[in-house]
Amino acid sequence: MLLGICRHWLELVTLFLALFVALPVLAPVFMKLGLEAPGRAIYTLYSPFCHQFAFRSWFIGGQQTAWPRELAGLDDVSFERAAFDSPAFRELYARFSGRNPADVTLEDLFTFTPALQFASRAFPGDENFGYKLSLCERDISIYGAMLVGATLYRRWRRKLRPAPIWLYVLLGLASIGIDGFSQLLGYPPFSLWPPRETTPAFRVVTGVLFGLMNVWLGFPWLEISFQELREPLERRLVVGHRRPGP
């Protein structure tokens, strides 16, 4: 079995990535079809891997494909205004804030409170919003890019060398790190500067760069490691076949 893994590690990793990317897309499809049990099970399954904030996620089957907060500065209907018109979201917000849904105001939703975060995480969507993927815009871009990278890597796996660390840091880590931390540190409890909200397009770009650079850096090293492990196993197998019987 170990030899089989060494020989087919790329196929196994590609299959895993394909399943990992497909399930988050199936979650909103199930919800849209009224199959809430499997849909919510997928949301629960992925919740340890992603914040699942509705204002940073893609949606299927609604009026918009994304509902960024008003701070993002886009012309689309903002998350806050759509959420205020959603009885389901107001009920969640009221539950996490310990208030009556009728007392929730639009101004409440413009404040980045724990209640807003928890409600946004728990909210799968509705008929107006559509239903969100179980991975946020950036995370689905990371793993989607890794799946594409794994597929492309098959063509160059014998020639491609690992990416230089400086290039990985520059393209993979720096872009996503600067974007993520500059956003995080603008919100409570840090509030080091006025809060900002990244656009969905920028989340996709930084996620794709990070995902592709993960493949470029990691997969050639995996190839080398599995080859070093595979060769003695294959030699041992050949010797075993050649050994005469009693």
Image: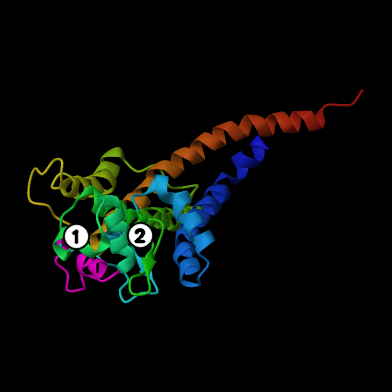
Q: Report the residue at 30% width, 43% height from top.
A: 168
Q: Could one spot residue 190 in this view of the protein?
A: yes
Q: Report the residue at 15% width, 41% height from top.
A: 189
Mark 2 Cα-neighbour bin, 10 Å: few <14, some 14–19, many ≥20:
many
Q: Amino acid at mark 1?
A: Leu
Q: Give me the C-alpha separation between circle 2 and circle 1.
A: 14 Å
Q: In this rendering, would 219 be left or right of 76?
A: right
Q: Amino acid at mark 2?
A: Phe
Earlier residue among tags 2 and 1? 1
Q: Look at the image and give the residue range highlighted in magenta.
A: 71-86
**Depicted 170 relative to depicted 229: above or below:** below
Circle on res. 183: none
Front position in the image: 181 or 165: 181
- Quadrant location of residue 111? bottom left
Q: Could one spot residue 152 in this view of the protein?
A: no
Q: In the rendered structure, does residue 79 fall within the stretch colored magenta?
A: yes
**Depicted 79 relative to depicted 217: above or below:** below
Q: In this rendering, would 7 be left or right of 104?
A: right
**Depicted 39 relative to depicted 127: above or below:** above
Q: Residue furthest bottom?
A: 63
Q: Report the residue at 50% width, 55% height from top.
A: 41
Circle on res. 123: 2
Mark 1 Cα-neighbour bin, 10 Å: few <14, some 14–19, many ≥20:
many
Q: Report the residue at 52% width, 56% height from top.
A: 19
Front position in the image: 234 or 67: 67
State the image coordinates of residue 199 (x, y, percent, origin top left).
21, 62
Q: In the rendered structure, does residue 221 fall within the stretch colored magenta?
A: no
Circle on res. 109: 1
The quadrant the N terminus occupies is top right
The quadrant the C terminus occupies is top right
The structure's colour scheme is rainbow
- Quadrant location of residue 170? top left
